[in-house]
Image: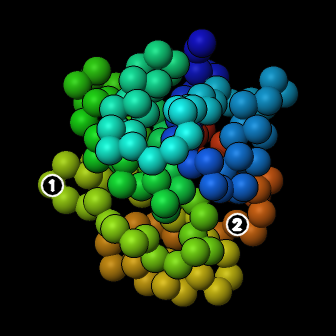
Amino acid sequence: MLAAMGACSIVILPDEASAARAECAEILAAPASNCTAFDIAVPPGASDLKFVQVCAAIMVADPRPPLLIVSTLASMHLLPAVARAQRAARHLIRGYVLIDAGHGAPVADPSGESWPDAPVFLVASIGDDAARLHANLRGWQVVDAEDARDIAALINDLAHELAP
């Protein structure tokens, strides 16, 4: 599948508990969408090797770089492994979008030497003070969106803005 001209391919990481993520994936992957989105799925349930399943599913989906990676805060622990796998495949990541900020700051922040390797955008709504503070402390950009349609539109816009 080819990415829309002048846009990043959008790779949406799994999180079976997030309604906002499911709605965004449905909107972005719809045939009427003007972007190319890959809704990555792995078998449900906790696994110590979930990052391997996610990286393998991305490889099978074969998105055309550059990539915009979308994750919920609950799944952001997968991002360093995804970043390493994409670097190994020589796929350029142009940014990360973190959604579901309404649940507060992430429990575990995977920031370190290998991640983030591209700009991070936290999608927040009014009142997400803990998430906003966490993002500001790390130099991540905070963008406002209230519902799944707004979030999907924001992701679509970022996919076009971040493309080389």
In the rendered structure, the answer to whether residue 58 lies left or right of residue 16 reads left
**Nearer to us in this view, 113 or 102:** 102
From the top left corner, tell me how far across and down residue 21 is, in percent: 66, 51
Quick check: 132 above or below 95? below
From the top left corner, tell me how far across and down residue 97 is, in percent: 51, 53
**Nearer to us in this view, 20 or 87:** 20
Q: Earlier in the sequence, mark 1 or mark 2?
A: 1
Q: Which residue type carries mark 2? A: Ala
From the top left corner, tell me how far across and down residue 73 is, in percent: 49, 62
* Residue at image coords 49%, 85%: 130
Q: Quadrant of residue 113?
A: bottom left
Q: Quadrant of residue 90?
A: top left
Q: CA distance from mark 1 to mark 2?
A: 29 Å
User: What's the mark number on residue 130?
Assistant: none
Quick check: 1 above or below 8? above
- Label 2 sits on residue: 145
* Residue at image coords 25%, 36%: 84
Give the quarter of the figure containing the N terminus. top right
Quick check: 161 above or below 100? above
Q: Can I make out residue 8 in this image? A: no
**Nearer to us in this view, 49 or 150:** 49
* Residue at image coords 71%, 56%: 20
**Number of numbered discs:** 2
Quick check: 13 above or below 141? above
Considering every residue shown, the one lying at the far left of the view is: 113
Q: Which residue type carries mark 1? A: Glu
**Mark 2 element type:** loop
C-beta proximity under 8 Å, tags 1 and 2: no
From the top left corner, tell me how far across and down residue 6 is, in percent: 57, 27
Considering every residue shown, the one lying at the far right of the view is: 32
- Label 1 sits on residue: 113
Neighbour tally class for label 2: few under 14, some 14-19, many 20 plus, Cα within 10 Å: some
